[in-house]
Image (cartoon, rainbow, N blue to C red):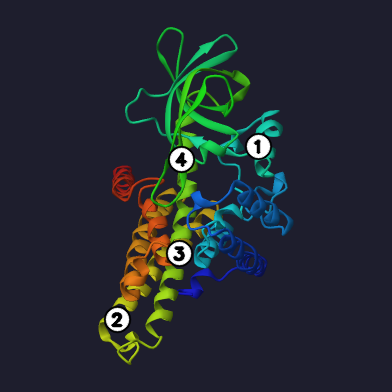
Amino acid sequence: MIGATVDALPAALETHRQRLREFLAQEVLPAERAARVRDEGDAPVDLQRRIRQRSAEAGLFRLLQPAELGGGGLGPLGAVALHETIGACGAVLGRFVLGNDGGLLRHARGDQRERFLIPVLRGEREAVLAFTDAREGPRTAAVRDGDAFVVSGVKSFVTGGARADLLLTVARVTATDGTTAGSAIFVVARDAPGVTLRREKRTLDGAVHGEFELRDVRVSAGDVLGEIGAGLPAALASVAVLRLTVAATACGTAQWALDWALANVTRPHRTGTPLAEREQVQAMLGESATELYAARAATWAAARQADARVPADLEATMAKSLATETVARIVDRAIQLTGGAAVVDDHPLAAAYRRIRSWRIAEGTTEVLRLTIARELLARRSTR
C-alpha cells in the first residue's frame, strides 16, 4: 500500500484490520457477486441485514462504537484504518460491515439512550440524519405546543431514509410569540402521523435517498436531542466527523484503483509489449501514486490528531477535500489505462467511477470546503 509507514498501527488495531480484510474477502464480496449487486441501491434489504448480522457475529460490527456502551472504542484512528480497508477491497456493500458510533444519538440522555441509542448501536433500528431542507423550501420549523412540538417542512436527500426507523430532524424552533428560539434535533419516527415519503431519489453512485414531507408532526419534548438552540452546531459537528471517514474511504478506493491499473498495464498487450513499458503510462502511474501518498498522509495525520483529542476539524476538512479530489483523478486514470472495457456499465472501474463522484459533494462540496478552510485560517490569524 502506498505510504505504508503512514499507517503503522498498534498491534491490536492491525489485527482488527486483518480480520476485516478476511471478512470482506470471504463474506461480502462473494455475497455481492452471488446477488449480482453493482450499486448499493441494487442490494436487497435482506442482504444488507445479513451482512450486518454476520459482521456482528464476527465481532466487527461494533468496533467503532463507544467502549462505555459495549463497543470496541477504537476512535478516529481506528475509524480511518477500517474505512480505508473497506475502500481498498472494492466492495460495494462494505459500509454495512461497521455500525456507526451513534452519531447525533450520542447526545441522548436518560431513557432516550435505551429507546434510541442502544437499539441503533446494536443494529436493531436504523437512524438517519434529515438535515437538508428541500430547495423549494420552506425551512423546516418547529413550534412548541404544550409539552410537545409541532414540526413541519420538507427534508431532501435523506440517505437511507426510506428504510430507516428514525429521522433525526434538524429544525428551527419558533417560540409562541413568533421569535426564533434556535435550532434543535428532533427524533421523528419514520411511521409517525404526518410523515410522508414523497419520493425516492437514486443518485449516480446507486445510493437511495428519501424526500420527506413533515406536516404538523407532533414530537414529544422528551424526543428532543440536546438543548434547544444547539441543534445546528451539533449537526455540523457530526458532519465534521463524517468527513474523516469519507477521506479514509476515498484513500482506500484510490489504492484499489491504482492496484487495478498496475495489474492491467503489466499484462501482455495486443501490441506485443506491456503498456507499463511506455513512459507516458509510467508518468500517469507515478502521478497517481504521488497524489495518493499526499492524501493518505493528510488523512492519517488528521486521524492521529483527533485520536489524541486535539481539535482536528480543520485538518479533517482539508483531508476530505484532498482525498475526494484525488480519488477522482486516480480512478479516471485507471479507466484511461484500461481502455474501452472500463466504460462498459458492469465493469468494476465504471461502478467505482459512479460511486466516487458524489463524495466531492457529500459532507460539503470541495468548493465550499476550500472557503471554510480559508476563513478558519483568516480567523485564527486575526486573533493573534
Of labels 3 and 1, earlier in sequence is: 1
Q: Earlier in the sequence, mark 3 or mark 2?
A: 3
Count of numbered badges drawn on the protein: 4
Give 152 or 382, whichever is nearer the viewer: 152
Task: Tell me which residue sits at (37%, 30%) in the image.
Answer: 134
Q: Is residue 134 above or below residue 239?
A: above
Q: Is residue 234 visible?
A: yes
* Residue 62 in sight in this render: no
N-term-proximal mark, 4 vs 1: 1
Q: Please report the residue visible at 67 percent of the width from the left and 52 percent of the height from the top.
A: 50
Quote the CA–CA distance across marks 3 and 2.
20 Å
Nearer the observer: mark 4 or 3; the answer is 4
Q: Which residue is mark 1?
A: 117
Mark 4 or 2: the one toward you: 4
**Which mark, by number, is residue 383?**
none
Q: Which mark is residue 209?
A: 4
Q: Nearer the viewer, residue 350 or 4?
A: 350
Q: Are marks 4 and 1 in contact (CB under 8 Å)?
A: no
Q: Where residue 259 sits: x, y (%)?
A: 44, 75
Question: For the residue carrying disc 4, how many other residues have a C-alpha within 10 Å: few (<14), some (14-19), or many (20+)?
Answer: many
Mark 2 belongs to which amino acid? Answer: Val
Q: Which mark is residue 253?
A: 3
Q: Identify residue for label 2.
A: 281
